[in-house]
Every structure is written in C-alpha cells, then in structure tokens.
Image: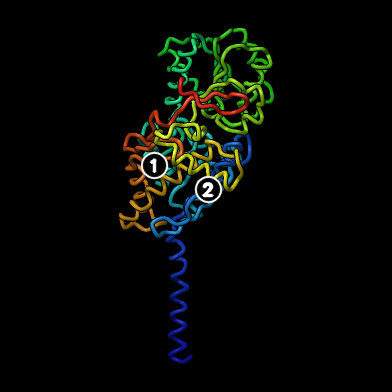
Amino acid sequence: MTPKSARISVLAGALALALPMLASAQIKVGVTVASTGPAASLGIPERNTVSLLPTEIAGQKIEYIVLDDATDTTVAVKNMRKLISEDKVDVVVGTSVTPGSLAMVDVAGETQTPMISVAANARIVQPVEGARQWVFKTPQNDQLMAAALADAMVKQGVKTLGFIGYNDAYGEGWLNVMTEAAQAKGIKMVAVERYGRTDTSVTGQALKLLAAKPDGILVAGSGTPVALPQREMKNRGYKGIMYQTHGAANNDVLRVCGKDCNDMILPAGPLLVADQLPDTNPVKKTALDYKAKYEGKYGEGTINTFGGHMWDAGLLINAAIPQALKSGAKPGTPEFRKALRDALEQIKDLPASQGVFNMSATDHSGLDERARVMVKVVDGKWTYQPGL
C-alpha cells in the first residue's frame, strides 16, 4: 500500500467511525400512541400530527420514532422502554389515554427521560415530585374542565347530577373532580355508574340513571366509546341535559353518535371551534395554523382536539430544544435529557392550539382558563357557546 493510499484508508476509517457519532447527534423524539384499540379515534390524529412536526430545530435534525400501543397499558410501557433503551430517544411523547400515561410516569423517572403525555388526568403530572419531575402534559387538567362544567350547570338550572364514566383511572379521576366541582356549586350527585371502554351495552346503568331522575348526566369517557351511553340515554327518552368531558371533542364521536349527540354540552380546547372564536382570543391564530396544516394534508373536517394535543407537544419541544442546546449538552446523552427537562419547565407565554402554556417547577401542565371553551352540538356540528 502506498503512503497516499494508506492516508486515504485511514481517512475513510476515521469517517466511518465518525458517521455513527454524527447520526446519534440528531435529536430523537419517541412517540407511543393508541392508533389502534378502543382509543384509536384519539391516537390516529395524534399519529397523523407527528408528520406535520418540524424535522429541524435550531440547526439540529429531528427524528420521530412512532409506535402503536393499541390502547394497552402494558404495551405503552414496553414501547417507552424500547424507545429509551434501544432507540436512545431524548424525549418521549404519549400515550393517548390516562391509564397508560400513568404507568409510563415511573419509567420517565427511572430513566430520567422527559415525557410529555397527551392524556388529561392531572395525576399524570401532580404533584411535581419524584418521577413526575420528568413528566409534562398538553391536555387540560380535569379540574379546569370540571369547573367550567359546574358553572354551565348552574346557568342551566341543574340541581342534581348523574354520572357514568369509564371503569378506569380516567373515569375515577373525573368522578372525583366533578363531585367536588358540583358540590361547590350546590349540585348533588344522585347516581354513579361505570362502564368499560369496550362494552357494547350500558342498559343496566342507563335504567339506574333514569330511575334517579337527575337534571343532568355527565358521561366521563374519551373517544368514540362515549357515544354508547349518550345514545342509550337519548333512546330511552331521557329529557335532561347530557354533558360530556373534553374527551368527547372528536368528530368521530359525532359520526358514531349521529343525531343522538345533538344538544350535548362539553368543555373543549379552543381548537375545536377555532374559526368561531373572536379575533382577540390568544389561541385563535395558532389553532387555525394547525388546522390549516392538518386539513391541508388529511382533508377538510378531519381536525380534532386530540391531534392538537400532539401538535402542542411539538410546540413545547420546539421551544425547549434551543434552550437545551445552549447548555452545551449533546443530544443522545443524559445531560441533554436533563437540559431538555429543565427547558420545558421554563417555558412561558407559549400560545398553542389549545391554550397558552406557562410551565413552572410546580406546574407541568401550565394551562389556565384560556385553554377551555364551552361547546354544544347543534344540528350535528360543534357550536361555540360563549354564554356558558
């Protein structure tokens, strides 16, 4: 081998060794969502939204690794461990539902990997201690939405309330916060029923609710399974007011529920009725920007608030990465994950599709009343209700 060819060989070898290092320097975002299973109507728009997120931030290439957990808590945890141990991600986004997200919290703490949940229950991020120091979320806390529901119930003259919710952490969380919010407004909870995400009948529960004769009934579920009790109560002639949580803010719910969804009332993120909001609303511009991008790719009328939660997670990451890079830590290292966590915690006045984020060391949700509006289904369409 000549000296020249030897030099070329050494350079080639050095380049080959350098390439993996360069590849690992890119920032990796791991995502696990329920794009199949009972919560698919949440996970599919979340998965779709990932394709709209930026692939370069602050001069760094961003790689998104997306997995489906099939609405299965065990799979969600396995996915998170795989993303961290095998794919070496810098942050994990997911999952779509509360039980899976709660189970993932311990993994975030154990591996010291920042996690941004796209599920709603406040227990995912509260209190901010232990493993939860590594966890953030984009959906509105249940308490924020329950308070809005209680205010609307008072305005509508509701004195007694019935409840039917999922027999899991989502339903239990909503029962707790709604009972507290209702009691604070002098509203009595007179009947409580539960059902499963995969149930095909709630006849027994409906008959018990009807017997209690409440002025209003709250269905505490998410995605298309919320249509089951909604239809059952309407078909059995219930004349009171049907309420839903923000878990029902989904066009697939309207498709499945049909005319039985008319007149139901719920609190939702501003994205759901963005084009109906006044121009003074601080969220309108960013919400319409996301809507234009999503519907531009997936078709008119396909937007929903669950995809918005993923979009907002992307906005949080977009805001945090430049600050994390200023620390000098390199992507793919524990130091960068820590810097990214710290940067997420310091985000202030960030308008997103669902509200304005102000994170802090004691608040990893960061949303206030600007993250909710009251909505009613009128003739099969979401209708902004500023009077509620």
Whether residue 89 sits left or right of residue 35 in the image: it is left
Which residue does the image show at 31% across and 58% down from the upper left? 328
Helix, strand or loop for disc 2: helix
Nearer the observer: mark 1 or 2; the answer is 2
Q: Residues within 10 Å of mark 2 (few under 14, many from 20)?
A: some
**Residue 28 position in % (x across, y down):** 46, 54
User: Is residue 9 visible from the viewing direction of this image?
Assistant: yes
**Residue 331 position in % (x across, y down):** 40, 57
Helix, strand or loop for disc 1: helix
Which residue does the image show at 46% across and 92% down from the upper left? 2
Comparing 192 with 154, the one in front is 154
Comparing 356 with 310, the one in front is 356
Q: Return the residue at label 2.
A: 50
* Distance of label 1 from label 2 (alpha carbons): 21 Å
Dot 1 or dot 2: first in sequence order is 2
Quadrant hosting residue 225: top right
- Identify which amino acid the numbered label 2 is placed on: Val
Whether residue 36 sits left or right of residue 12 in the image: it is right
Q: Return the residue at label 1.
A: 134
Q: Mark on residue 268?
A: none
Whether residue 73 sits left or right of residue 234 in the image: it is left
Using the image, determine if residue 217 lies above or below residue 302.
Answer: above
Q: Residues within 10 Å of mark 1 (few under 14, many from 20)?
A: many
**Residue 176 position in % (x across, y down):** 46, 20
Instruction: Farthest residue to the front: give it.
Output: 279
User: Is residue 123 visible from the viewing direction of this image?
Assistant: no
